[in-house]
Image (cartoon, grey):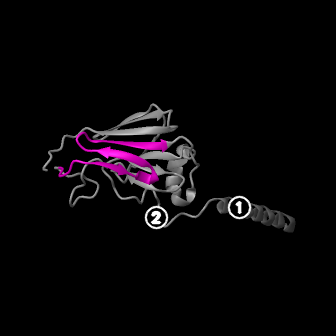
Amino acid sequence: MKTWLIKLCVVLLVIGIVALTICQNEPPEPERCSLCDYIKCHAPCIVSLNTGKTGELALYQPHDTLVGEISETSCNSIFSFVYPAGLTGRMTTYPWRMEVDIPMDRHNMDKSYFCNACRELLKPYRNDGYVLMDNHDKSDIKLYPIEEGVEYEIRCYQISVTKDSEKKHLNLLEVGTLVIPYTG
């Protein structure tokens, strides 16, 4: 009887050590997850899986009071440089479009920026460096790979990705399809 009890204790000890080893290989969850804790957005977002930086690809003027919605009018016509998720892009209004340069050299996901649930969501993309996120419905976050040749339509945004071989990066092009009155 004592031999059986000793063997059981040894087995439980080994299981405990293995479980501790597995848990120590995973970084702890952050206070704020870069994916699910990011503010609700109307436009898709780019998420850097290596740095946890997230940036909305906002073309339209935001609504004055409703988070994640767009204004019914636009009061500016601009060309500007944008830096979503630490990347460089160019945006114009009238026509509504944004181009973002995404490096070809991809870095692996740093799990320390994401909660356990989002780590599971991101698992298929963990070596992609960047991912496109639609979090307009916070209860149903959607992820899209950013790779050459893909095309997506997310609400009123058409997105395509091409390769710019001269500069050795991917070019993400977002075009807005809404016609919003210009109020000057």
Distance of label 2 from label 1 (alpha carbons): 25 Å
Dot 2: element = loop
Type of amino acid under label 2 = Arg
Q: What segment carries the magenta color?
A: 74-102
Left or right relative to 61: residue 104: right
Seen from this angle, which residue lies furthest top? 149
Among numbered discs 2 and 1, the one appearing first in the sequence: 1
* x then y, percent, for residue 137: 34, 51
The image shows residue 164 at horizontal and vertical percentages of 47, 34
Residue that carries the numbered disc 1 in the rendered image: 21
Q: In this view of the protein, can residue 143 be seen by the observer?
A: yes
Please tell me whether residue 77 belongs to the stretch shown in magenta. Answer: yes
Q: Position of residue 49 (x, y in %)?
A: 52, 51
Quadrant of the snapshot with the N terminus: bottom right
Q: Secondary structure at mark 1?
A: helix
Q: Which mark is residue 32?
A: 2
Judge by depth and name the residue closer to the eye, 168 or 170: 168
Residue 127 lies left or right of residue 11; in this view the side is left
Quadrant of the image occupied by residue 179: top left
Q: Callout 1 environment at 10 Å: few (<14), some (14 to 19), or many (20+)? A: few
- Looking at this rendering, what residue extends furthest in the left direction? 183
* Disc number for residue 100: none
Give me the residue at 32% from left, 45% from top: 91
